[in-house]
Image: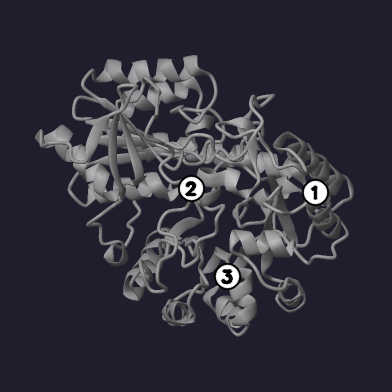
Amino acid sequence: MYDAIFFTDHVENPTFHVPSRIPPIGAFKCAHILRKRGYKVLVVNNTNSFTEEELEHLIFLAVGSRTKFVGFSTSFYWVNFDSLLQGDKGFEDRIIARIRKRNPNIKIAVGGAKVHTEFSNKNADVAVLGFAETSIINLMNHLDNHSSLRNSYKNTHGVTIIDDRLAPGYEFTKDPMVWLPEDVVNFQILPMETARGCIFKCKFCSYPLNGKKKMDFVKEYDVLREEFLQAYNDFGINKFLVSDDTFNDNVEKLNRIEDTVQSLPVQPMLWSYIRLDLLNRHIATLNTLNNIGIRAMLFGIETLHPKASAEIGKGGPKQPLLDTLELIYNDYPHIGTHGTFIAGLPYEPKESFMNTMERLVTKDIKLNNWTFEAFRIQANKGYTFTSEFDKNYEKYGYKDAGFLPGSGWYNSGLVNWDNGDTTYTEVVKIVEDFQKRASEANTFSVTARWVLGMLQFGISGLDYNKLIRTPAKDLDWNLLKRGEQVFLEEYKRKLFKILDGYV
């Protein structure tokens, strides 16, 4: 039995569940923090792909008299923001009842980016805000040693809120993440936190620690080397998703990471967020990134409209950025590129972002694939981290048009905005029509991002270097679906084997 169990998942599209091939790091990081203090902790990934019977069996194996709490990480849920599990509420109620039947004293905790001060789910006893490394120790000490629960209060729904959202006192830069076999199971890619925070403060962004100085919250390089080596020596893994809001925010940082990588016995392959204007400004770092092992880049381009880009904090001429994309496309064909765009930003008329859509469909913009999403404004001011636009959208020409028609993940907790030129619902329809058209035109669509970001490494029959130049319409989706099913079956089989052996 375990002292604590965390359930996590990455449900980015509730109608097309793709198994999480890269463990969402939050729950695993909490487990790591508790294990350092001698606790036995289990993390269950791809939770929402388990059947009710499978979850009941897992609870029977993992939950017992020594279990202090069961946690649910909801960062990557897109619907039912106040849920512990995706989908049917009755299903969630039955699973929580099963947990409490095993041990009536267990507390149910929830954390992740979707958790907010007025979290209202009655199945949750405790909600943890923000980074949880400090809060999770606080909670365990309270439940195990009966110490006071610091920085906590009950909200209007009776849920206890722990608010240590920036994890004060946690030495992030000095703590090497350690993975256990029951974490890795059959994963072939791991996340790696190289830094926290961002030196920029884009107005649409609600990420914490924005506006930091360049070398703030950057992991020490011997710590990163230790993480690389542990993954490779213990599990044979050399592929990583870099968890860093802006990986290329500092030339010195990149040079040091390059030195670290060159000291390793094997060349890693990495996927990361890259700031395109910085890459253009320091073009020599493109070769540095290549030497580090970056094989897929995500660029938050958002808009090509001058006034809109200046307003969100990404101003400057756009043609040099597009030239840099073309340079990567031609001279570094082994590096996949993904761009994100937002339709409906302040001061950008719909004709402008629709023109950008046209340039993507005709491949005038040299990206391997892209994501276009409607501009979203969070209606709930109680969210742990909110953007400038969330807090003051009226100042930028938006008004709340009232009831938001329809349902689904697009509409969860959002403002039904109208900016005088277009509306949220109209932009959603434009984006949906564009994605359909892109797919029919044999160019990339939103679903292609799943197979191009390093997410599908490890599926038999797929070659990443071919994937990054293969249009979505030409992909073997049957092979992908079979690979997903095999992955999930193997994950569950190996996890249950570990649990059976542990019991």
For the residue labelled by badge 3, is the local secondary structure a helix, a strand or a loop? strand
Q: Amino acid at mark 2?
A: Asn
Label located before the other in sequence (3 or 1): 3
Q: Amino acid at mark 1?
A: Lys
Is 366 displayed left or right of 340 in the figure? right
- Report the residue that reaches farthest toward the bottom: 284
Q: Which residue is mark 2?
A: 186
Q: Which residue is mark 3?
A: 294
Front in this rendered view, residue 86 or 163? 163
Marks 2 and 1 close (CB-CB < 8 Å): no
In three-dimensional space, the C-alpha distance between marks 2 and 1, rounded to whole angstroms, equals: 45 Å
Q: Residue at x 53, y 53 (%)?
A: 205
Q: Which residue is mark 1?
A: 350
Front in this rendered view, residue 277 or 192? 277
Q: Residue at x 47, y 33 (%)?
A: 47
| Image quarter in which the C terminus is found | top left
Is 171 displayed left or right of 299 in the figure? left
Front in this rendered view, residue 487 or 472? 472
- 287 to 467, vertically: above or below: below
Marks 3 and 2 close (CB-CB < 8 Å): no
Q: Residue at x 49, y 81 (%)?
A: 251
| Image quarter in which the N terminus is found | top left
Count of number-bearing discs: 3
Residue 420 numbered mark, or none: none
Is 343 displayed left or right of 458 in the figure? right
- Residue 290 image point, x, y percent: 59, 77
Q: Amino acid at mark 3?
A: Ile
Q: Nearer the viewer, mark 3 or mark 2?
A: 3
- Residue 207 image point, x, y percent: 47, 53
In three-dimensional space, the C-alpha distance between marks 3 and 2, rounded to whole angstroms, equals: 23 Å
Residue 324's image quarter? bottom right
